[in-house]
Each structure stands twice: as structure tokens, then as C-alpha cells.
Image: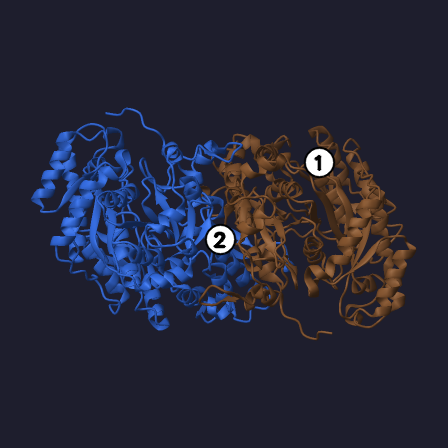
Chain colours: A brown, B blue
């Protein structure tokens, strides 16, 4: 057994990449189909995206997890390793995953490009500026804000109520001091003073819009209908009313193209888009997922947080919007996290504890039931850690057998694709054997209230929903504005099936409190806010930035 | 005579670009020396920059102008056309110019990539996100701000006086509402409340630092010494004190590499860096200019605003920092602008007016004298407009003859390089014949006061300088901090030789008032502020953004 491990960046930098042109060739894309960003990154051109539309459509596999805990589940790592495993057993596979935000990169040690021997490369570039997508989104977000404030300054023809401006500014950083600000100070030449705030870029509605748009034309339509403010009559004012959807789309014309990179084992990966998984839907872009399905037989993709949030939103929001369906869903679980769900403290996780582990199964069980209720085949992936004992693993395997749920061990962090072959084979069997009767749990024609209730009762296992008086009033307004047929996007704690992050395992009988709704009309959903939702993280006492450096030849150092 | 003209973007989009790999090949760079951004843009790798250092050094030609007026001088257009003209007469030339900021692009109609048939391409990309350099600078600027505010929030070990934080945030947009803001509101978990403000990215000291750095190592040294605040003892606190110069350099590791593109006539152009010409030095990067000189026999480059600002700063700040010297200086003048300097209103410029034109020569004359006082050969370029009458042109040509200054007509907007051949030939003669005795007008060992006085008296033709009591007090402090040996960077109105923008022509006997100094220790200069300096522009009543659009295939529309 290994006792010391290399860091992710060490493993990444010791790996040898192939030119991205060669990687693209394996999935039928020529150099002319690509817009290169150096030798190892590229965007896929509009022409190529159009050209591949007549290809056969591959099978989509969604990777999700139990409710995350500080012990870690390794969902992205399993997603990458599973793609490599498919390639190893001779299947043509592509990984479709989210691109990281700089905020967490500079803040808390931990990349978003997988880990160990299951990573996408070049990890430094992907974790830093990559191909500039997030910068384009930040710019479009802030250009809209500047144009809106300029509208106020230049006479306010649309009669915007400056107290009811809902469009916030954005930076792709963790910067708590920008959460609440007052802008426009300094006298009549410096704008109209008002309250404002900054979100992290991935929380911008533009990120959600970009990730749900079918193409550039649809992107413009969606941008035009984003609500930025209300006028003095409390009617919504949109980007279209300001007349700037063309400029915003122009700023996003390259960001909308999917990025192609490779894993350590040279499996192609489309890394594109990364909306928040609370106030947005937490999935990579529709354009990338659809392109991936046209370029390979198997697409491995993931949703943010656990199955109650990521998978629910993938299935109700992204799949519906994109007209796609997954063939099977992988639920990633770790012995460590299951023990935490069973009541073990983080400091005691290295000790064997069968009783707590068994208690923790309840969390996994609920997610299995939920995915099955969507009519989808499920496979459990046990992401193995060196502290897991044989007895613990055996106990989980036996429980899965009793529950009649297919299961496979994965060791992709340590072994790359080889550590995911068992999971890949299990998936192939399941896709072959089990019937796929995918259907959403709610219809868009259900009332907004009913849609929330369905999610709470069928996905979270809660008893009911309580709406605050503010939320109730909003529902009446939304009816009037014609927004009742939109999807619901829940903003809820990722740590618990309930809206109380301390309730681990499988809580029952709980009521979920919806305090407020936030319309994301461009994205096409109404966000239901439960509890506090952080849309601008802060930096820790010792930010990761303090360890970062670069040598004279441009080699990144200290990046995880 | 043509009566209607195509727009810049029409001309640009009708042009056929060559692959940038082919353009690079003409100056001895292989595909391996490049990091491609699509087919028509690339960055030059560190390895290539090192490799070319042993090449012969080409001759640098600096393009500057008379004091700008609303009539326009077309300095960038002449710079591009002159490069093309050198190519046409069989000389190996490269253009080295600044890259545009998105703020003006979204705000006021008018690109920064030349015009007519003298443009650099792809103009849409260069005017939008280009290769992400400005986004990287914005991010580094704001990461530093977030890390600084986090330092306050986490206990303020360095005892920073929150009223004396001088580091501002940045966006690459025109957004007046962000000029003066209050941040950190919302209670103890949301940061420390304080006054702050946003500059446009090109006004960030990081832009100036990037443009003056010799290489990545020098960049880190300069970033480390940037002053961000003062502590409670009023001592400067630097980036190095915060320990984040490594992270900032990492964020800039690609932005520091020069970008290569081409003109409509396929002349290579390094378009890299673009600091403000008032609170910074207004020249493209040292790295790009030096690389250009190693890759061609002639480098055509420019400085911001007129010769009193752009050329003075090129010669005193950039040339000194880079260890380079120009072989000759081109002063661009237009009949229209000279008439404005002679007192004609903008609405009357189409009418012939020999008397006012002759009065306006005084402005041109002062700039010729100044450049000659640096020991440098001068050529006047008359950038012809269709409204110029033969008699007006003849009058200017004769005046130049009387003044013994070489002169050439240019028609590069309409005719591309062909319209600049006369100017190129004149330059070659001048470089051949005239002696170059380049020397700065002040030494770094002069006192800061003396350096300002030298610029005011010798470059502006003013009588003297008056320092406010605040400025005087600052000079004492700077002496104490060891900053007296730095260069001076004047922030003065570009419209007049004096600090009063209404004094056109060649004012005399004036006093320049320095109200405050702003140390840019990373860049290596002290900014002397005269009058109001705008570091965050606003948007006009009808911003250019309202006309921008993009079609379904990603083609930019309405961009100028």
C-alpha cells in the first residue's frame, strides 16, 4: 500500500499530453474544425457543431453522488476515470464536465479538474484563465450593469425604480467585501447612488443562460428576456427593453463554443460552462453535452452537489431544455462519507465503524430510490480510499446486493482508467439489460407551488413545503407576468436532503421553507431560495494564493 | 474623388487574412514558437523570446502627433500604414502597437486598431477579448484587492490603515457608477466597510508594470514592490508584504507574452499591452517592442496622445527602462487639427482657412523642437483628408521646408501601405543622413521636483511649475521612502501643451499646477497629477453597444 502520494499538480505536470489536434482526430474532428488555444486546448467551431448534427447520438451517463460531506466523494474524479475506463475497454467515450471558477482556485486548496491519475489537462490552464469563457461572462455581466446604470444616469426613459434593480455585478473571485456595496457616489456626474452587490461569475444568470442555450441564436433570445429591474409600476424590465442583447451576445460569441481538452490517458473531454449548483442548475453546457453525444458512443457527464440537487436539476432542467436523456446514473459514494451520514465525526473517519456505516446507507438508499423514480437505471460506485477496511467495503457491497442495486468499486484516483473498468463494465451491462423509462417527476404545466412540492416530497423525502408570505406574494406576481410554466431551480443546502445542513443521513417528516423566489427568466427557471444562499464566497485566513507561484519559464507552482 | 466610404469593419471583414503561422514564418518564427489562438492570432512563446535575443536589433521608429483635437489625427492608422509601406518598398518591418480596451469599444464609436485600409486584423477579435490579456490584468488587479480586504477581515496583521488603502478595483468597461463606492457593508461577516473605487483596467498599475517588465522574473519583482496601502504609522505596504506576488505573476504568465497578428496587407504586428497615457506611460509593452526589434529591420511603434505626453514618456520612461532608442520620430499632423489649433471651430473645418492653418503651425513647431532637443531626427507626416485643399497642403509643405523639417504626405486610410510609401522613403533618407544623438532631458538622479520642472519647461514650453502644499508634503515623504530616483509620469490634459485643455496652439508663459503625486513603484515612476484625471470613463447617452450584434454564424455586426 502506498503511504505517500504526489500532489495533483505534480501528477499533471509529469503527464505527457498529445497535441489536441490528434485527440480531436480520434473523434472525427479535423484541425479545421478547431480553434486552437495553444497546442493542448481548443474550441470547436460553429461550422463543426453544425456538421456533426446529423451524426448518431451516443449514450449519456450521468454521474452524481450522495449528499456531499467534508470527507469528500470524488465525483469529478470518478467522472474522468470512468471516461478513461470506457476507452480502455475499447469504447469510444467523451467526458463532458464543468469548467472551474478562479474564485475557489485562489481561495481554497482544491481543483475542479478531477484528481490523482484521473485529471483533465492542462490542469493549470483549465484552473486559471482557460479559454477565457468566464472572463467573457464576467464582462457581459458587468457591461449590462454599466449600461443599466448609464440608462439611469441619462434620464431613465424606462422609469426604472432604482430600489428594484435586481441585476448585480460580478467578479470571478472570492471577494466578500463586494457582497453589499453602495455605488454611484461622488455627485451628479458619477451616476445615481444606489445599493448594489457583486456575485461570483458562476452565479451570474448569464452563466446559466450560456449553459442552457441551444445555439448562438437561442443565446440571444434568452439574454433578451433576462429581467434586470422593475419599473415604478413594478413591471419587469428586461435586457431586450434596454436593447443590448446584441452587444451581450457579441461578447459571448466565442465563450459559447465548447472547449476540448484531454485526460491524462488521452480521452477527449469537453470542459465547458460551470453554473452554480444552488441558484442555478450546476451542469456543464447543453451545447457541449449535445456535441459530445454526436462525437462518441458514450458521454460521461456530471451534475453539481448530490443527487437531490445535481441530478434533479440535470433531469428536470437541463435534460428537458436540451431534449436529451441519460441511459444510466452513477451514484458515487465513499465509505468515509457514508460513515459521516451515520453520525461519525470527521476526526474519527479513519477508524472502522460498521454500525455507523450501516446507518449512513439510508442516505444512499434515498438517492437510489429517487433516480429509479425517474425511470432510470442506477449503478453505485464505491470510490475507494486507503482508510476503508475490507469489512466496511464488504458490508456496503452486501447491502447493495440486498437492495438489488448494481455496484462497482472504483480506484480511479490511484489507478486512472484501470481503476474504473469494473464500473464501466457494470454500466454497460445495466444499459444493456435494464429498461429505461425516463420521465420527469413534474410537468412544466404544474403550478410553481406544485413543482416545488413535488421536488420536496419525491426527491428530498420531505413532508411538505412552507412558503413565506413574501414567496406567496411573488407567486401571484409571477402568474401575472406569465412565468408559471417555467421550471423550478431549488437553492438548498447540499449537505442534507432537507434544508437544514445539520440533518445528515435520511431525515424524514421535515418541512422545507421557501423564503423567496428569484426569477431567472433567461435561463428559464424560477429559483426557490431556502435558507441562506451564498452567491459570493469569501477567502479563508490563509488563501491558496499565498502558495502560488510561477517559475521563470512560466511553469505554475503551488497550484494544489 | 470618392464620395462614400466603407466602414472600418466592412473593410476589415472583406479582407483576406493569411494564417498567422505563415505571417510568423516571414519573420523567422516557426509554428513551434507560437501559441495559437485560432488561425489568425498567436502569442510568442517564452522559448522563442529567449531564442531571438541573439538576433541583430532592428531600427525603431516612433510615431507621435501634435496635440490631439476632436478633428482627429489618425496616429494609429499612420502607424499601421507606415509598416505596410516599409514592406512595400522591400524592407522587413513589424508594427508594435497597443491593444484596445473594451470600455471605449462598448462606449464610443471608434476602434483602436487603425482604420480604413490601414488596420490590424482580425479587428473584431482585437477589439473584443483578443487573447485575454486585459482580462488577466483585471483578474490580477481584483485578486489583489480581494486578498487585501481579506487581510483586513482576518485580523489585519500588517496594521493597514483602512482609510489609506490606495489600491483600487478594476473593470475593463466604462462604468461611471463604480468611480466612488463603499464596500464591505452588511455586518461583520461581509468584510470591513470602507471607501473604494474602480478604475478602468488600462489605468491599473498592473497594466503599466506588465508593459515595462523585461520578462516574467522582472514582472514579479515589480509586482512585489507595488504599494497598495499605508499602515497606521503611514509606512507603505506592498504586494510583497502581503506575500501574493507569486499568485499575481501566475495569473499574468500568459498575458506577458506578446501577441502577433497581421495588417490588411499581411505585415506582422505585435499588439500587446495598452496602459493609459495620463496616469501611466501610454506605450505598448517593452517585451513586444524588444521582440519586434529582434525580428525585423524596422519597428514602427507609437505613444499615446501627442508628443508632449506620448513621446516624452516613450523617451524618458519606456526607452530608459527597455534600453532602447528610436532612430527617428514621426509627428503626425492633419490640416484639420492644425486649423483647430489656429482657432477654427469644429463645424467650420471643411472650409479653407490659410490664416488659421498658419497660426496652428505653432503647435507642430513646438513638438518638432522638443523631439530635436532629445537629439532625434524628426519627420512630419501630413495625414491627408478629402476636405484638405491643395493650397492648404501646399502652405504646410512650404512651412516645413522653411523650418528645414522633412515632410511627407500620407493617404494610408484610403490607400493602405501605398499611401505611406513617400513617408517611408523620407524616413529612410533621414535615418541615413541625420545624426542621432539621443539623450534624455533629465537624469533619474535629478530631484523629483526638478524632473517635473524640466518636462514643463523643455517639453511643454511652460514658465514654471507650482506644487500644491499636499504635493510638497508628498515629496518629503517620498524622499524618506527612497523613491526620489524614479522617473516622472505626467498626468496632464492631452489637448494642450499646458494643463488647461482650452489653450490650443502654442501657449507660453503658463504655470503648470501639480496638485498631487501618485506613486507607481512597481512601474517605476511617480505620477504628477495636474487638473482632474479620469481613470474611469463614463458611457455616452447612446453607447456604441446599442448598435452591436452578431449573426447566427458568429459574425460581428455594428462594431464601428
Q: Residue at x 48, y 42 (%)?
A: A191
Label 2 crowd bin: few (<14), some (14–19), many (20+), radius 10 Å: some
Judge from the rendering whether residue B221 lies leftward or rightward of residue A349; answer left or right. Answer: left
Q: Which residue is mark 2?
A: A38
Q: Residue furthest right?
A: A402
Residue B85 x, y percent position in the rendering: 24, 43
Q: Residue furthest left?
A: B402
Q: Chain of mark 2?
A: A
> Element at badge 1?
loop
Quadrant of the rendered structure where residue B382 is? top left
User: What mark, if any, has residue A323 been given in the picture?
Assistant: 1
Q: Chain of mark 1?
A: A
Residue A41 x, y percent position in the rendering: 54, 52
Judge from the rendering whether residue A189 lies leftward or rightward of residue B346; answer left or right. Answer: right
Quadrant of the rendered structure where residue A210 is? top right
Above/below status of B104 relative to B245: above
Between A159 and B554, the residue placed more toward the observer is B554
Above/below status of B156 relative to B203: below
Judge from the rendering whether residue B53 lies leftward or rightward of residue A194; answer left or right. Answer: left
Pointer 2 and pointer 1: residues touching (CB < 8 Å)? Answer: no
Quadrant location of the N terminus of chain B in the rendered image = top left
The reply to whether residue A363 is in sight is yes
Q: Residue at x 77, y 44 (%)?
A: A327
Residue B66 x, y percent position in the rendering: 22, 45
Between B252 and A403, the residue placed more toward the observer is A403
> Element at badge 2?
loop
Q: Earlier in the sequence, mark 2 or mark 1?
A: 2
Above/below status of A528 relative to B60: above
Q: Depth-wise, is mark 2 or mark 1 nearer the camera?
A: 2
Amino acid at each position: 500500500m502506498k503511504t505517500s502520494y504526489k500532489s495533483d499538480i505534480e501528477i499533471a505536470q509529469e503527464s505527457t499530453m498529445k497535441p489536441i489536434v490528434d485527440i480531436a482526430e480520434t473523434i472525427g474532428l479535423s484541425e479545421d474544425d478547431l480553434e486552437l488555444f495553444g497546442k493542448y486546448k481548443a474550441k470547436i467551431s460553429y461550422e463543426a457543431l453544425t456538421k456533426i448534427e446529423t451524426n448518431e447520438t451516443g449514450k449519456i451517463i450521468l454521474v452524481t453522488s450522495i449528499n456531499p460531506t467534508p470527507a469528500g466523494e470524488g465525483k469529478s474524479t470518478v467522472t474522468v476515470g470512468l471516461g478513461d475506463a470506457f476507452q480502455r475497454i475499447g469504447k469510444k467515450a467523451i467526458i463532458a464536465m464543468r469548467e472551474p471558477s478562479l474564485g475557489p482556485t485562489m481561495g481554497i486548496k482544491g481543483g475542479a479538474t478531477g484528481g490523482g491519475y484521473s485529471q483533465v489537462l492542462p490542469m493549470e490552464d483549465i484552473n486559471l484563465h482557460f479559454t477565457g469563457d468566464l472572463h467573457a461572462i464576467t464582462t457581459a455581466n458587468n457591461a449590462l450593469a454599466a449600461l443599466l446604470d448609464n440608462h439611469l444616469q441619462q434620464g431613465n426613459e424606462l422609469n426604472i425604480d432604482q430600489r428594484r434593480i435586481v441585476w448585480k455585478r460580478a467578479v470571478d473571485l472570492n471577494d466578500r467585501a463586494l457582497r453589499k456595496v453602495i455605488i454611484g457616489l461622488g455627485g451628479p456626474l458619477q451616476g445615481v447612488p444606489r445599493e448594489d452587490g457583486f456575485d461570483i461569475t458562476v452565479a451570474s444568470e448569464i452563466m446559466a443562460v450560456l449553459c442552457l442555450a441551444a445555439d448562438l441564436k437561442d443565446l440571444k433570445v434568452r439574454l433578451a428576456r433576462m429581467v434586470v429591474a422593475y419599473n415604478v409600476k413594478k413591471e419587469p424590465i428586461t435586457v431586450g427593453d434596454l436593447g443590448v442583447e446584441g452587444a451581450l451576445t457579441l461578447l459571448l460569441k466565442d465563450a459559447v463554443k465548447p472547449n476540448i481538452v484531454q485526460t491524462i490517458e488521452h480521452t477527449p473531454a469537453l470542459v465547458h460552462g460551470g453554473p452554480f449548483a444552488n441558484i442555478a442548475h450546476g451542469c456543464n453546457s447543453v451545447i457541449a453535452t449535445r456535441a459530445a453525444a454526436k462525437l462518441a458512443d458514450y458521454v460521461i457527464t456530471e451534475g453539481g452537489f448530490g443527487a437531490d440537487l445535481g441530478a434533479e436539476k440535470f433531469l428536470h432542467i437541463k435534460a428537458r431544455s436540451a431534449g436529451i436523456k441519460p441511459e444510466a446514473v452513477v451514484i458515487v459514494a465513499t465509505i468515509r462519507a457514508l460513515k459521516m451520514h451515520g453520525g461519525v465525526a470527521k476526526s474519527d473517519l479513519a477508524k472502522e465503524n460498521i454500525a455507523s456505516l450501516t446507518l449512513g446507507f439510508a442516505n444512499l438508499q434515498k438517492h437510489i430510490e429517487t433516480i429509479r423514480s425517474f425511470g432510470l437505471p442506477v449503478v453505485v460506485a464505491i470510490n475507494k480510499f486507503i482508510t476503508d477496511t475490507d469489512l466496511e467495503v464488504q458490508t456496503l457491497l452486501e447491502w447493495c446486493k440486498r437492495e438489488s442495486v448494481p455496484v462497482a468499486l472504483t480506484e480511479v484516483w490511484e489507478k486512472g482508467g484501470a481503476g474504473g473498468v469494473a464500473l464501466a463494465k457494470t454500466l454497460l451491462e445495466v444499459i444493456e439489460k435494464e429498461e429505461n423509462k425516463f420521465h420527469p417527476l413534474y410537468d412544466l404545466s404544474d403550478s410553481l407551488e406544485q413543482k416545488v412540492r413535488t421536488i420536496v416530497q419525491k426527491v428530498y423525502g420531505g413532508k411538505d413545503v412552507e412558503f413565506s408570505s413574501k414567496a406567496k406574494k411573488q407567486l401571484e406576481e409571477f402568474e401575472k407576468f406569465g412565468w408559471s410554466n417555467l421550471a423550478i431551480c431549488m437553492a438548498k443546502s447540499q449537505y442534507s436532503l432537507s434544508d437544514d445542513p445539520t440533518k445528515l443521513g435520511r431525515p424524514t417528516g421535515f418541512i422545507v421553507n421557501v423564503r423567496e423566489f428569484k426569477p431567472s427568466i433567461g435561463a428559464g427557471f424560477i429559483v426557490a431560495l431556502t435558507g441562506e444562499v451564498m452567491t459570493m464566497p469569501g477567502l479563508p485566513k490563509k488563501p491558496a494564493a499565498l502558495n502560488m507561484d510561477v517559475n521563470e519559464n512560466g511553469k505554475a507552482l503551488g497550484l494544489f
